[in-house]
Image: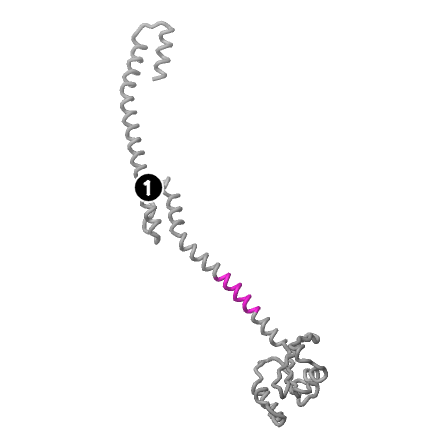
Amino acid sequence: ILSNLHSVSDVRDFPKLSSIHNTTGEATIGLKLARFDNPTKTLLTLGPPRLTTLLDSHIFFLKELPLTIHSGNNTLRILARSNKVFTLFAAINTIAFQEVFDDMLRTYLILLITGILFSFLIGMFTAGLALKPVKILVSSARAIKDESTGTLHELPTNTTTLEINELASVMNEILNARDRNIDTLRDFTADAAHELRTPLTILKGEVEVDLRTKDLSLDEKEAVKSNLEEV
């Protein structure tokens, strides 16, 4: 505005220039135009009466400005500029700026909280997908053998994770080796029991024959019976 005011005759252009260059948005602004050599003498005022009255009724010195004044629930910012011909004072009600700042702060907090919640949900979903093969492996390991049918099961090796598949393959090899060793031990035990059963049967038969055919004393019969029970 001041760059277009060069002489006293330009004062008539002040309202038009003010409306063109007012870029304060929704903020309420009051303007006071005064002579540079006599800032106390008002040439023209524009804006809400409350603000222009404040500018016209107070003497503001350039060295004191900018200045902040609190009036009720409003905060007023007093500014001034000079071009060596005129001095232009401005009183701006910053409540609109404060409302915009508060709205921006609320929006930021909402976006922040929403972003945190969204990130948490995405993290939970991703973790669930990543741990799904592990859960399948754990459940399969718990059911590695069906006790009701005796059916052997192997850990699945077709999950979506290559490392889990490799681990399942190694564990299957270990379990298969264990089963083979158990089968070998079971066969050995059965063969050993069969080999021992035959001589024990023969010995039992001989002891029973001795009890029936031989004339043994009472003590000998008791000893033979004890041996028979052990057999």
Q: Residue at x 34, y 15 (%)?
A: 228
95 left or right, relative to 135: right
Q: Label 1 crowding class (10 Å Cα cut-off): few <14, some 14-19, many 20+?
A: few
Task: Please tell me whether residue 109 is drawn above or below residue 31 in the rendered image.
Answer: above
Given the current orientation, which residue lies at the most extreme bottom position? 9
Image coordinates of residue 45 in percent, x first then y, are 66, 88
Question: Which color scheme did the rendering employ for the protein?
Answer: one colour
Q: Residue at x 69, y 83 (%)?
A: 55
Residue type marked 1: Leu
Q: Which region is colored magenta?
A: 105-118
Judge whether residue 112 is colored magenta: yes
Could you say which is closer to the camera, residue 45 or residue 101?
A: 45
Image coordinates of residue 185 in percent, x first then y, are 30, 31
Say how many tags the image has. 1
Location of residue 175 by image quarter: top left
Could you say which is closer to the camera, residue 229 or residue 56?
A: 56
Given the current orientation, which residue lies at the most extreme right position? 57
Location of residue 216 by image quarter: top left
Image coordinates of residue 111 in percent, x first then y, are 52, 66
Q: Which residue is mark 1?
A: 152
Our reading of the magenta stretch's main secondary structure is helix
Task: Please tell me whether residue 194 is drawn above or below residue 92 in the rendered image.
Answer: above
Image coordinates of residue 180 in percent, x first then y, are 29, 36
Task: Please tell me whether residue 95 is drawn above or below residue 226 in the rendered image.
Answer: below
Q: Quadrant of the N terminus?
A: bottom right
Task: Please tell me whether residue 113 is drawn above or below residue 155 in the rendered image.
Answer: below
Judge whether residue 110 is colored magenta: yes
79 left or right, relative to 212: right
Q: Quadrant of the C terminus?
A: top left
Could you say which is closer to the camera, residue 86 or residue 141?
A: 86
Q: Helix or strand or loop: what does disc 1 sit on?
A: loop
